[in-house]
Amino acid sequence: MSKREHPSFSSRIGFILVTAGAAVGLGNVWSFTYVAGKNGGGGFVLIYLLTLAFIATPVFMAEMLLGRLGKASTPTSLKKLQTSAGSKLPWALPAWIGLVATILVLSFYAVISGQVMAYGWEALQGGFAGWEKDQIIALDKAFKADPSVPIFWSILFLVATAAIVSLDIRKGLERASRLMMPVLFVMLIGLVIFAVLRADFGAAFNFLFGFNEMQLSPKILMEAVGQAFFTLSVGVGGIMLYGSYMGDDVNLPKASLWIVLMDLSVALLAGLAIFPILFSANIDPAAGPGLVFITLPLAFSGIPGGAILAFVFFLLLTFAAITSAISLLSPPTARLEEAGWSRAKSAWVMGLGAFILSLATTLSFSSWADFYPLAFLGFEGMTPFDLIREGVNNVVLPLGGLAFALMVGWGLKREDVRAALPMENGALFSIWYGALKYLVPIAIIALFLTAIFGGGH
Ligand code: PHE
């Protein structure tokens, strides 16, 4: 495919906002708080921050660079690069695994996003204002108890996502991201201020950043690394595909830095907004995937005009989730288009696949809550949802990232990599390149060895 046929974003800022929109999603608000809470806070957050800075960010740039060089669907991009690097290794393989992973992520993403949408709807009818904690907990329970409710909302979410992907309204998305992102920031900052004034901010701060009670296990290590990759969308090819749409005038390292900073700020703000409310309402930080669905409504229940604010917030979160879901559905869609399918057919068929798989997550929250299909392999206490989420986030994403790091660090020629980066600073380039060549592979391999031999899974 020639460069001219392959679409690109209209402007530099447009590229940054759309890619930040793909990165910022449920990972920052829902999964960051749920996983940090489940894993005891401080130690988890420290590892998450270190991995984000030194491992996931360099790999994020590498993945984007592979897209810029390949300018096609992800398996095709990597196949091309394999040929030009003269390598005998199956470079396209991680991209194919990534395509499967995007649909698996989308499957649980749809269920959680569905609940976000449902809560927006609840708020629109005046819900949450003045509600008691028990009422809020009951709503979360009721939502999950009858699978037809989450199924309805997941379908709605997937239909919206597939429709946007099939219509290819990238321009519209750019415009919408420009407006929604800043509003999401302002609302999060507002929630943090509320938490400082009215909730137990001190306890939350200690929990998130107090490293005194750090108990590191291989499992926490995996979760923190998985979360760092998940939040930046690294490892499945979504970022590669967006990189392939990037105009040649975009400064890749600078753009990456902006995207990472936006992503990190949203996660930290969400943490600082949600944990104070949790501590002052005596909710267990390890409450699980329903955590935000209890704490966020609780925050809004105590704020004047809470129902309207709750509606706006859940709407923004829905939007953030949709922009991420688009980046999940786009890579398989792009590959099917290359195979001659129409864009619409590709998007709808893959969306249907995600829906079927999403039933495993929906049921994990109700009748399968005590169903541990891989208990015989030692995965005790893990529902199908846990297996999908942890398997993809903590295993597939880091291994995909490892493959991308090796391709850029060892597969491609250093001059070619250097030429593709308009980075003014040679020293920075060397640090990044060195990280991809040595630090990232060693760290990820060490992580898996620790997990395998240290008893984690
Ligand atoms: N980064 C997205 C989030 O934080 C999730 C995602 C993962 C999107 C992998 C695409 C690929 O919500």
Image: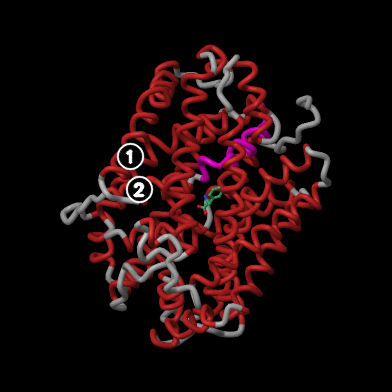
Q: Is mark 1 within 8 Å of ligand 1?
A: no
Q: Is residue 120 above or below residue 30?
A: below
Residue 208 in percent (x, y) is at 28, 57
Q: Which residues are magenta?
A: 233-249
Residue position for label 2: 222
Quadrant of residue 106 in the image?
bottom right
Contact? badges 2 and 1 (CB < 8 Å): yes
- Residue 57, given in percent of the width and then of the height, sits at 44, 36
Mark on residue 411? Answer: none
Q: Say which residue appears at 39% left-offset and 29% top-offset.
A: 441
Query: Disc 1 designates what residue?
Result: 447
Determine the residue positioned at 55% across, 21% down. 421
What kind of element bears circle 2? helix
Nearest the viewer among 303 and 245 is 245
* Place of residue 310 in the rendered image (x, y in percent of width and height, measured from the top left): 52, 74
Q: How many marks?
A: 2
Crowding around mark 2 (Cα neighbors within 10 Å: few <14, some 14 to 19, many 20+) is many
For the point 45% across and 33% down, which residue is it?
402
Q: Badge 1, how many Cα within 10 Å: few under 14, some, many 20+?
A: some
